[in-house]
Amino acid sequence: MQLQEELARYGYRQELARRLRFRDLVAYGLVYMVPIAPMAIFGSVYAGSGGMVALAYAVGVVALVFTAFSYAQMVKAFPMSGSVYNYAGRGISAPVGFLAGWVILLDYVLVPGLLYLVASVAMHATVPAVPVWLWLLGFVGANTVVNSVGIRMTAMVTRVMLLGELIVLAVFLAVAGWALASGRGRFSWDAFYNPDTFTWSLVAGAVSIAVLSFLGFDGISMLAEETRDGTRQIGRAMAAVLVLAGVLFIAQTWLAAMLVPRPDTLLADGDVNGTAFYDAAAVAGGSGLATVCAVATAIAWGLPNSMVAQVATSRLLYAMARDRQLPTFLAKVSVRRSVPINATLLTGAVSLALGLYMATRADGIALLSSLINFGAMVAFLVLHVSVVVHHLIRRRSGNWWAHLLMPAVGFAVLAWVVVNANIAAQRLGLAWLALGVLVLAGLYATGRRPALSGLTEAQPSGRSLERV
């Protein structure tokens, strides 16, 4: 009841079903991040880090721990869906919130399309008789149906899928560890630090790639209106997921780095075919283990990972639409299922169209990955600023540790990563931001200046949203 009153204070009704517990949030976050995510991009991170792939993931964990802390501060202040869009809009100003939402759309809207595309290409390589477009259609269709049924169904399916991923990862860790103990591969700490290749700019560039594996812990904040036990659980779940996934990422990439069959070639030429991890798995356990890892990665990205990504995207569209900063039809909620049905269906359609188009481009996966990472990191930077502005400046908080030092360190680390990111990603990301500024100017010109309910006492206490 208290959570419903919190929403009412900001002018919203409780429309989404509060059915998720802490364990559901943790499972959701882990599935979104994919415990075996590094398997798909291991070669790119290895080559980009000069072989220090485990270090890149370790730095990524440290960088995002500060971001998780800032999320926890803001979700307690504003316990609602919308993530950085709401935190920046209410913590700084509505126009800044619009731009933050626009930037994070680059992450959330593109992520499902990327996941579907990676999974479909991988499954096509495994079963060439089934074309990429058919795999895409199957993955998108299955996930859209599950997400349309309701959040409880999504939570149940993701828990089952998570168990499968963890089993595959446990098998790889055990077999790889045994292989190294048996003399295959070469035991080394070079994956953490190699004096011959180490530079901070090199590590930062690799972290900007590795960040793709971490995206998803922040998606938990989108479920603030669907958790049963209070928004404090959101922050706890985000921290738990980030640490758990980080440990798993570091462990598997370290073992794989010691089993890479031709490390010099991988460093010189990169991972053109995206098979570096599976080549390492083949050294450890033969072609059987390599195939299991490849298929598990494809299924993980194509079903559970893209399923929860679709959930997060639909909640962002729903949050912006109910504030009339996107078309209001996206704010419609199914009375029977308590899900934003139009936003869910639109996310599926956009993901399918995006996946089909990018499948025709040779650089489709690389282009999507760069755009997604840039959008996420810029949104995280805005998040840190919103903590300082809302708590320290506006509310005159005396907690300098939580409301200044922590977000300032998080901002500095992420800014360092963004500056050293791929130049193409920087250009495309800034172009997207510039387009958002033009859209914002258009809203002002047409008298639709961004405004969020509950920011002032003079604003109306609520909006009547259409339900279907």
Image (spheres, helix red, strand yellow):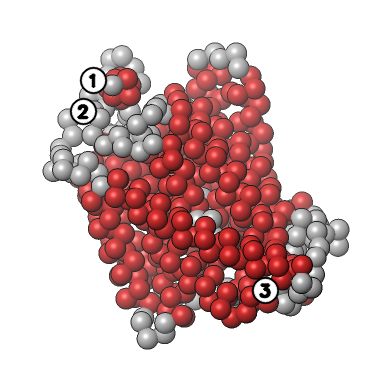
Q: Which residue is mark 1?
A: 460
Which class describes the residues within 10 Å of circle 3: few (<14), some (14-19), or many (20+)?
many
Horizontally, residue 56 falls left or right of residue 392, namely right
Which class describes the residues within 10 Å of circle 2: few (<14), some (14-19), or many (20+)?
some
Q: Quick check: can you spot residue 457?
A: yes
Q: Are marks 1 and 2 in contact (CB under 8 Å)?
A: yes
Which class describes the residues within 10 Å of circle 1: few (<14), some (14-19), or many (20+)?
few
Of pointers 3 and 1, the one earlier in the residue sequence: 3
Residue 31 image offset from top left, x and y in percent: 46, 53
Quadrant assignment, res 151: top left
Of pointers 2 and 3, the one earlier in the residue sequence: 3
Residue 30 image offset from top left, x and y in percent: 49, 49
Tag 3: amino acid? Ala
Residue 243 image offset from top left, x and y in percent: 60, 43
Residue at far right of view = 195
Q: Secondary structure at mark 2?
A: loop
Q: Secondary structure at mark 3?
A: helix
Q: Which residue is mark 3?
A: 284
Residue at far left of view = 468
Q: Residue at x 68, y 77 (%)?
A: 283
* Above or below 75: residue 278: below
Q: Residue at x 31, y 59 (%)?
A: 143
Which quarter of the image is occupied by the C terminus? top left
Q: Residue at x 57, y 49 (%)?
A: 245
Camera-nearest label, 3 or 1: 3
Tag 2: amino acid? Arg
Q: Which residue is mark 2?
A: 463
